[in-house]
Image: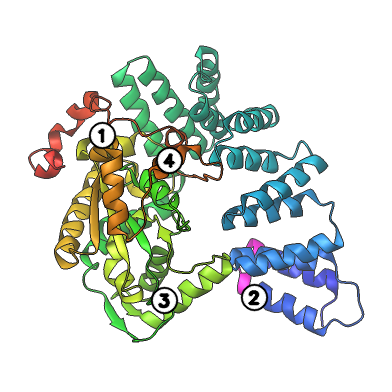
Amino acid sequence: MDNQSGVIKKTSLLIEEKKYIQAKEILLDFLQNSKNIKIDIKIFYNLYLVSSGLNELKNAKKYLEKCLKINDKNHIILNNLGNIFFREGNILKAENFYNKSFQLKNDYLIVIINLAILNQNIGKLDEAKKFYLRAIELAPNQISLYYNISKIDKNFIDENKIKFLLNILKNEKLDMGEKAYVYFILADYEKKNKQFIKEIEFLKKGNDFLFNSKKKINSTTLDYWINILPKKYNKFVFSKDEKKSELKDLKPIFIIGLPRSGSTVIEVLLSTGSEKINSFGEVNIFNGIIANIFSNDKDFKINLNIVRNKILNLLDEKNYKIKKGFIDKSLENFFYMDVIIKIFPKAKFINTFRNIEDNIFAIYNVLLNKLSWTHSLDSIIKYIDNYLKIITYFQKKYPKKILRINLEELTNNPKKVSQELYNFCDLKWSDEILNFNQRKDLLISTASNIQIREKIEKYNYEKYRSYKSLLKKYLKTHQWLNYK
C-alpha cells in the first residue's frame, strides 16, 4: 500500500489529467486499507474533486463535509460547499457557506464573485453590484465582471470605462472569452448611442470571439445541433420499454422552444401557483443522456432502462424531491419528445414563441456562451429552421400534449393566457399568480433575470425593427421569417 503522501501526489496528478475513475479507485482503496492512522484532509479533498469531476454531487458534498470536520476554517472548502448547495437550489445554505468563506478571507476573489452571482440571481441587485465592485478592485482586468454589472446598472459603462476597455483590447495575450465580453459591452454602449452599424460590428466580433474561445467543443456541438440531431429526432430506436416504472405516473411540465421567447416568464408563472411545483430550470437531463448515447452509438439506440436509471440517479444526486411532477425548462427538449414521452407518458409540453424575426435578434445580441449555435446569424437561422420543422412534426403527432404560448399574447393579456396555461396543466389558477414579481424566493439564472422581476409589460414591437435589414439575404430561402 502506498503511503498517504504518495497517494495524495499520485491522485492529484490523475485529477489534473481528468482521470477521475482511476484516481477514485486509488483513494477508496487507500481508505479501505488504512487502519489506525489519521487521514489527511487532502485525501477527502481529492475525493471531492473526483466526485465533482464525475458529477457525483452527493458524494462531492459528503467528502467536503468530511473535510469540514477536520478543518472548519478553510475558506476554499466552505466556498465549494456553497457551490454544491447553490447547484441544488438551496440558496440559504449556499449563502451561509459563501459568507463564512468571505468572512475568513475577504479578498478571496472566487467567493466574492459567487456572492455577486447568487445575489444577482435572487434579485438583490444592490448587493450583487457591491460584490462585483469588490471583485473588480481585486481583478480590474477581468472584463466579465464589467459585463455582469452592466446588466444590473445600465449607467455603469461610461466613456471612461469604454476607453479603459479599448485599451485592454490592445493586450495580445487577452483571453478570447474576455475579448468577447469587451465587444458585447461595446455593442450595448453603441446601441444606447443609436449607432446601429457599430453595434452590429461589435456584436459580430463578440460572437466570433465567443465561438473561437472554445472552438473545438463549439464546432462539435454546433454540428450536433445543426446537422446530426435534426436527422435523428424521429428515428430513435428504443429497447427495454417497461410497462411499470416509478416515473410513469409523474406529470412533469417541459417548457420547450427557442431562447428569449418568454420561457422564463412561463416557468415563473407555473412555479408561483398554490401547488408549489418545483422547477429544475435548465437541467438538461435528456440532452446530457442522449448526447452521451450518441458519442457511443451513432444510430441513437436508446435503452430506456438506462435513461430511467440515469434520471433517478440525477434526481437523487441533486437532492430533488418530487411528488406529482416538476418543471423542466431545458428548451432543446423539443428534439427529445419521443424519448421523454416514453419515460413520462403523462408529460405536457409548453412551447413558447414570439415574432420570429424579433427572436433571432433577441438571441444574437445576448451573450449566450453555452450555446454554440447562437454565435452567428447563419447558425441561428439554421437552428430555427430545424426547430420549426420539428415542432410542427410533434404538434401533429402529439396535439393534446403541446400548448403553444405566444409571448405577444401573454404580455398583452396575461390573465387570459395564464388561465389557459393553468387549465392545460390541470393546475388551480388564482390572481396571485400574476404577482410573481413580488416573490422573495425567486431564483433566476437566465439572461431574463433582471426584467422578469418587473410586472409583465406589453410587447415592444419596435425593439428590433432596425435589425430587420440584416435578414434580407435569408428571405428567399426561409419564408418562415414572416412566421408567428
Q: Position of residue 397 (x, y in %)?
A: 16, 67
Q: Position of residue 169 (x, y in %)?
A: 51, 26
Q: Position of residue 245 (x, y in %)?
A: 41, 82
Q: Which residues are magenta?
A: 15-21
First in sequence, mark 1 or 4: give its number.
Answer: 4
Numbered circle sitting on residue 412: 1
The residue pinned by badge 4 equals: 210
- The secondary element bearing badge 1 is classed as helix
Q: Residues within 10 Å of mark 3 (few under 14, many from 20)?
A: some
Disc 3 or disc 4, which is closer to the eye?
Answer: 3
Q: Nearer the viewer, residue 48 or 29?
A: 48
Q: Are marks 3 and 4 in contact (CB under 8 Å)?
A: no
Q: Please, is residue 56 above or below residue 142 in the view?
A: below
Q: Look at 24% across and 24% down and name the residue there.
A: 462
The residue pinned by badge 2 equals: 22
The residue pinned by badge 3 equals: 247
For this view, does 116 lie left or right of residue 382?
right
Q: Are marks 3 and 2 in contact (CB under 8 Å)?
A: no
